[in-house]
Image: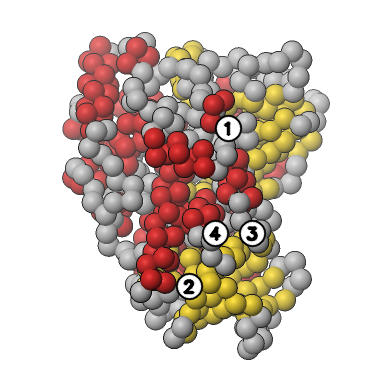
């Protein structure tokens, strides 16, 4: 094989999660316990900790109050990141959203001033690359019938699509404490497909990249309920998929721009201290390298439970041990930038059988003359891989490995890559493993006293709609606290 790095592309340092501030305060304190001044420096009605979609949404719905949003990272948005190559915006994380056409969702996006008219993704939305061949529109009934499967397997998948279309009318779990068909949460998606539906393992293999990318783990490690709920939106004849040029970063940016004051970045909340009339927050300002104390009438903790359990005091009212049951996937996103000529039929393109990456999309989808294009490659890390291992990976090594994998599937692509932009997310999304949704739904209070939890992991589903719903619920909880 020709040396794919005969022309060395520029490889950028890691971007994405800025883990050092949180790791420093939660795990390593070589200088001993941090010291904070006893005086409260500022007072607010509401302080939101975390500027991902949940935190930004909650602040957006409370913007008539005095609200301050604190973010440990360099920019707001969480996994909704945007990159740029020669003026071309591309998604560097969460890329698309569903339910365009649903009146309530559409009204919410329009309220943010987002350009919905141009956001609908043209079909085919998804395409499958399997054994060297493309299968466009792979989740539609006509597309399912083209897959290289036995007649029994194809008929089984078509029947499953029919079942999901019927279930779509009654399954509405987001924001609800109930879980329809809870028995499906007790088994894995692989078990459901191969044992309940008697589909061959080849079907499970074909769905593996989808599960890894969207649910954080393979079909053997995610619950049938979660897997089917996600596939419901793919098989649906009603759901409409939409995307902006920079992915869901545009949603986060619109939310952030609506806030006054703006999000305060570089601020790590180390601890919360409930008081009789509010909550004190101990904050470390990474930019000024100092600690200070804030006070709020109420706090929204818009963080994953892996971080929340380090900030919450033991007497806050939650059983912090249950937060240890929340499991998250690690993720690497690589933007291969250059004059990419690869033609792929789908917006989201799934690659079966490659352990290095699961899917990719190309911006712009259709080439415009000889202009630049970006191939965003999504590389979910093996589930349960230690985050220490992810932190040890050198960007050069990861870039070369991913480029080699892309070249193996699509020969000639590597020589067109001029730059590789790398993004690393240590806790990208919640993994809904079997029985997790049952444990979460209705069993963890969103609010205790004047502290409110808000994160998509409380919905147990790793999608932006879950994050938005959690932010909306948190805002309503705050209003109820103040009304009481």
How is colour applied across the structure in the image?
secondary structure
Which label's residue is closer to the chain start, 1 or 2? 1
Tell me if 166 is positioned left or right of 6 in this view: left
Give the labeled residue for mark 3.
Answer: 260
Tell me the quarter of the picture where residue 42 sits. bottom right
The circle on residue 115 is 1
Q: Disc 1 and disc 2: Cα gap in Å?
A: 34 Å
Q: Is label 1 in contact with label 2 (beta carbons under 8 Å)?
A: no
The residue where tag 4 is placed is 63
Q: CA distance from mark 3 to mark 2?
A: 18 Å
In this rendering, position of residue 206 left or right of residue 131: left
Which quadrant of the figure contains the C terminus? Answer: bottom left
**Of tags 4 and 2, which is closer to the observer?**
4
Q: Position of residue 471 (x, y in %)?
A: 45, 55
Q: Residues within 10 Å of mark 3 (few under 14, many from 20)?
A: some
x 57%, y 73%: residue? 44
Q: Secondary structure at mark 3?
A: loop
For marks 1 and 4, the one nearer the N-term is 4
Nearer the observer, 482 or 376: 482
| Neighbours of disc 1 within 10 Å: few (<14), some (14-19), many (20+) | few
**Dot 2 crowding, Cα within 10 Å, few <14, some 14–19, many 20+:** many
Residue at x 32%, y 64% (from the top left corner) = 444
Which SS class for mark 2?
Answer: strand
Q: Quadrant of the N terminus?
A: top right
Crowding at mark 4 (Cα within 10 Å: few <14, some 14-19, many 20+): some
Residue at point 28%, 16% (across, down): 154
When asked about the image quadrant of residue 8, the answer is top right
């Amino acid at each position: 094989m020709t040396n794919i790095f005969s022309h060395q592309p520029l490889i950028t340092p890691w971007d994405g999660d800025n883990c050092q501030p949180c790791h420093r305060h939660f795990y390593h304190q070589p200088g001993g316990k941090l010291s904070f001044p006893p005086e409260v420096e500022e007072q607010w009605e509401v302080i939101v900790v975390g500027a991902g979609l949940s935190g930004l949404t909650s602040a957006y719905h409370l913007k008539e109050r005095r609200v301050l949003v604190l973010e440990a990272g360099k920019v707001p948005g969480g996994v909704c990141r945007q990159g740029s190559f020669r003026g071309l915006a591309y998604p560097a994380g969460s890329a698309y959203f569903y339910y365009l056409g649903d009146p309530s969702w559409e009204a919410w996006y329009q309220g943010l001033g987002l350009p919905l008219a141009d956001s609908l993704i043209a079909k085919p939305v998804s395409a499958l690359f399997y054994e060297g061949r493309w299968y466009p529109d792979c989740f539609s009934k006509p597309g399912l019938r083209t897959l290289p499967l036995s007649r029994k397997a194809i008929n089984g998948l078509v029947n499953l699509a029919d079942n999901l279309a019927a279930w779509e009318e009654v399954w509405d779990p987001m924001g609800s404490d109930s879980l329809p068909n809870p028995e499906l949460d007790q088994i894995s998606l692989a078990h459901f497909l191969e044992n309940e539906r008697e589909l061959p393992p080849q079907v499970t293999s074909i769905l593996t990249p989808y599960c890894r990318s969207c649910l954080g783990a393979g079909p053997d490690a995610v619950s049938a309920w979660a897997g089917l709920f996600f596939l419901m939106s793919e098989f649906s004849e009603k759901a409409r998929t939409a995307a902006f040029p920079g992915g869901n970063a545009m949603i986060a940016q619109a939310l952030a721009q609506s806030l006054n004051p703006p999000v305060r970045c570089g601020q790590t909340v180390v601890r919360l201290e409930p008081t009789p009339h509010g909550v004190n927050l101990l904050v470390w300002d990474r930019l000024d390298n100092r600690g200070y104390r804030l006070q709020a009438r109420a706090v929204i903790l818009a963080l994953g439970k892996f971080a929340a359990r380090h900030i919450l005091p033991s007497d806050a009212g939650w059983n912090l041990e249950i937060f240890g049951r929340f499991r998250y996937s690690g993720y690497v996103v690589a933007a291969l930038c250059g004059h990419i000529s690869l033609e792929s039929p789908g917006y989201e393109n799934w690659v079966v059988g490659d352990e290095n990456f699961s899917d990719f999309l190309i911006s712009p989808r259709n080439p415009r003359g000889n202009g630049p294009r970006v191939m965003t490659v999504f590389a979910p890390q093996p589930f349960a891989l230690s985050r220490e291992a992810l932190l040890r990976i050198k960007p050069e090594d990861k870039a070369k490995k991913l480029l080699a994998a892309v070249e193996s599937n699509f020969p000639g692509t590597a020589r067109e890559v001029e730059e590789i932009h790398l993004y690393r997310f240590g806790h990208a999304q919640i993994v809904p493993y079997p029985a997790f949704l049952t444990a979460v739904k209705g069993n963890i209070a969103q609010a205790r006293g004047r502290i409110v939890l808000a994160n998509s992991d409380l919905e147990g589903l790793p999608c932006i709609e879950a994050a938005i719903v959690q932010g909306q619920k948190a805002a309503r909880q705050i209003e109820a606290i103040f009304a009481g």
